[in-house]
Image (cartoon, rainbow, N blue to C red):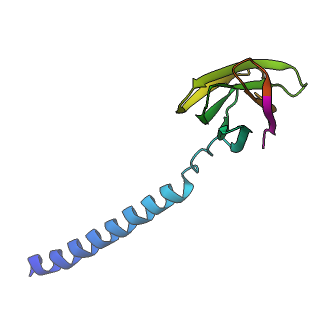
Amino acid sequence: MLIQRTRPATRHRGKVAAAIAAAAVATLVSAAPSAVAADPSTQFGPLRYGASYALGHIRWHLRSVDVDYSIKAYGCRTLWAFGYDRSGLPQGAASATVCDRTYTGTMNVPVDVPGGASRVLLQFDDENGVTRAQETKTHP
């Protein structure tokens, strides 16, 4: 008889322990901080000159921006990205030149000031360095 009394109590304690464990896990999951928000992204382009074009996305970070781009070039074309701070002062630049092909890449523009870039100027130049298209994007 002692064995029969112990088994139901043991089973009951096991169920209680499982319920407590499940409640603890649920509490921890609901109290866990939410995932860190992704850096904002802004689409640009297409910037066109003749049959050539550049387009992509700007990813805004705390002290830089990444410009993910695709350039289709007939002749040589250069995509420039200039980062500006909140005061409108230029803080950094990057460029990519592509000749007679399609190329996809990423360039990093340092904007090493508190708050990072407030805007980015994109310029699409021809083989002579003449700007043929441009676009300005502001931090969202």
Image location of residue 108, percent across then percent down: 63, 24
By secondary structure, the bulk of the magenta-drawn segment is best described as strand
Q: Which residue is drawn at 16% across and 74% down?
A: 6
Please indicate, yes or no, whether residue 113 appears anywhere in the rendered image: yes
- Whether 78 is drawn above or below 24: the answer is above
Image location of residue 120, percent across then percent down: 78, 31
Q: Which residue is drawn at 87% across and 20% down?
A: 89
Q: Which residue is drawn at 71% across and 42% down?
A: 45
Quadrant of the rendered structure where residue 71 is? top right
**Quarter occupied by the C terminus:** top right
Q: Give the range drawn in magenta.
A: 132-140
Residue nearest the viewer, comparing 30 with 23: 30
Horizontal side of residue 52 vs 31, given as left or right? right
Residue nearest the viewer, comparing 72 with 120: 72
Horizontal side of residue 3 vs 100, given as left or right? left
* Residue 137 is one of the magenta-drawn residues: yes
Q: Which residue is drawn at 22% across and 74% down?
A: 11
Image location of residue 111, percent across then percent down: 74, 22
Residue nearest the viewer, comparing 30 with 124: 124
**Quarter occupied by the N terminus:** bottom left
Image location of residue 62, percent across then percent down: 70, 30
Horizontal side of residue 48 vs 36, given as left or right? right
* Residue 98 is one of the magenta-drawn residues: no
